[in-house]
Image (cartoon, helix red, strand yellow):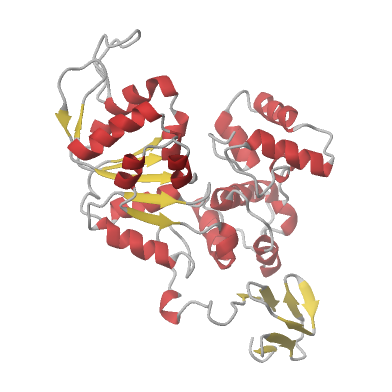
């Protein structure tokens, strides 16, 4: 690569290369670099970091676990690994699709509880009226429909790790009981009179601004202090563009496919916006493998996003999909309302919300 181009004084210069030098997909003879540009030279794909922002060489090793990534992910990975050996409550923060459950699993797998249960709980997917029953269990006859005892998810995690995802969605009343669980390490089922001691590690995650929710009275400050003994922020995919080729290769291997991805396709993916982060990229890879059928390579055409996904405003909150779709529709003049598109997909997939999410590149809760 060095014989075909050079970088000096923060400018890139083409040294009469055979196939050209491309910066953000545009062929250049020379160009000033600001930092963050994606550079293609022959079959090599590079990313330029402004002076002072590049990772140290000791951080460039790619860890071959589920948290695939390079230097941008390394600070979070190091903190999570250190936390695994402690009993501190860990709060993982990051946008939707950034891999918060994988981070929680790293804490579990790297710690002394690795042989015990890892129980993930999506707080936003449990109806408010049964949150306590789901978490803490219930006794037979505690309410209409309680035909048998239920130990609850907390006791299922005893000895291991309880992962509370979308913690910010938990109702205030349930927050009070969760605080008691964390302080007393005991749980009382709904309708029961006796509390049971539990031994577990708690890891929480959210894409919400919990300090802001505390200010608004939507989240208990004492619970926030309890769950946020150690806070780990995960970078967005737009902040770790250099990891996209690694992730694409990883997702292809998960599908047991041998299709190759030319450098031009990887360049195309690196220059796209990924508002729903790694989850959206994985969905795009799976969709591309389907569209490619018997072809040996994945081309940029295989990665064209569905209109339903493109209609979302990347800057909008994932918690406000209707408003985001409406705003995007107003900007683009799209004549098919987002609600109609969603209805079409639900009908096509016979009400299978997971399948609709796969088609849209969204999680079940977002759909």
For the C terminus, which image quadrant? top right
The answer to which of 174 and 305 lies nearer the viewer is 174
The answer to which of 320 and 216 lies nearer the viewer is 216
Q: Is residue 127 above or below residue 285?
A: above
Q: Is residue 22 above or below residue 15?
A: above
Q: Which percent across, then down, holds residue 66?
A: 42, 56
For the N terminus, which image quadrant? bottom right
Q: Quadrant of residue 166?
A: top left
Residue drawn at (39%, 30%), measured in percent from left and top? 172
Q: Which percent across, then down, holds residue 292?
A: 69, 51
* Residue 24 left/right relative to 331: left
Q: Is residue 88 above or below residue 194?
A: below
The answer to which of 68 and 54 lies nearer the viewer is 54
Q: How many marks?
A: 0
Residue drawn at (23%, 58%), measured in percent from left and top? 85
Residue drawn at (16%, 25%), measured in percent from left and top? 195
Q: Which percent across, then down, holds residue 315?
A: 65, 49
Residue drawn at (80%, 32%), measured in percent from left and top? 336
Q: Quadrant of residue 157?
A: top left
Q: Quadrant of residue 43?
A: bottom right
Q: Which percent across, then down, holds residue 257?
A: 56, 54
């Amino acid at each position: 690569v060095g014989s075909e181009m050079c970088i000096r004084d923060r400018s890139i210069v083409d040294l009469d290369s055979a196939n050209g030098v491309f910066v953000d997909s545009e062929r250049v003879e020379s160009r000033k670099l600001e930092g963050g540009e994606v550079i293609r030279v022959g079959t090599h794909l590079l990313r330029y970091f402004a002076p002072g922002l590049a990772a140290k060489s000791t951080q460039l090793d790619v860890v071959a676990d589920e948290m695939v990534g390079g230097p941008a992910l390394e600070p979070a990975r190091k903190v999570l690994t250190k936390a695994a050996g402690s009993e501190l409550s860990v709060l993982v923060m990051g946008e939707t699709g950034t891999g918060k459950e994988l981070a929680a699993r790293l804490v579990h797998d790297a710690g002394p509880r690795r042989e015990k249960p890892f129980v993930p709980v999506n707080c936003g997917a449990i109806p408010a009226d049964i949150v306590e029953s789901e978490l803490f269990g219930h006794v037979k006859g505690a309410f209409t429909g309680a035909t048998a005892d239920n130990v609850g998810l907390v006791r299922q995690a005893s000895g291991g790790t309880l992962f509370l995802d979308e913690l910010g969605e938990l109702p205030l009343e349930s927050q009070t009981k969760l605080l008691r669980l964390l302080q007393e390490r005991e749980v009382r089922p709904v309708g029961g009179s006796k509390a049971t001691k539990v031994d577990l590690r708690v890891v929480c995650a959210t894409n919400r601004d919990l300090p802001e929710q505390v200010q608004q009275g939507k989240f208990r400050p004492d619970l926030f202090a309890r769950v946020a003994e150690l806070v780990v922020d995960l970078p967005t995919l737009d902040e770790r563009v250099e990891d996209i080729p690694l992730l694409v290769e990883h997702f292809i291997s998960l599908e047991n496919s041998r299709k190759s991805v030319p450098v031009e396709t990887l360049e195309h993916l690196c220059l796209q916006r990924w508002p729903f982060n790694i989850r959206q990229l994985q969905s795009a890879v799976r969709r591309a493998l389907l569209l490619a059928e018997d072809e040996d390579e994945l081309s940029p055409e295989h990665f064209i996003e569905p209109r339903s996904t493109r209609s979302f405003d990347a800057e909008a909150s994932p918690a406000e999909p209707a408003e985001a779709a409406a705003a995007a529709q107003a900007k683009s003049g799209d004549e098919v309302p987002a609600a109609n598109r969603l209805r079409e997909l639900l009908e096509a997939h016979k009400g299978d919300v997971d399948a609709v999410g796969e088609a849209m590149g969204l999680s079940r809760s977002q759909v």
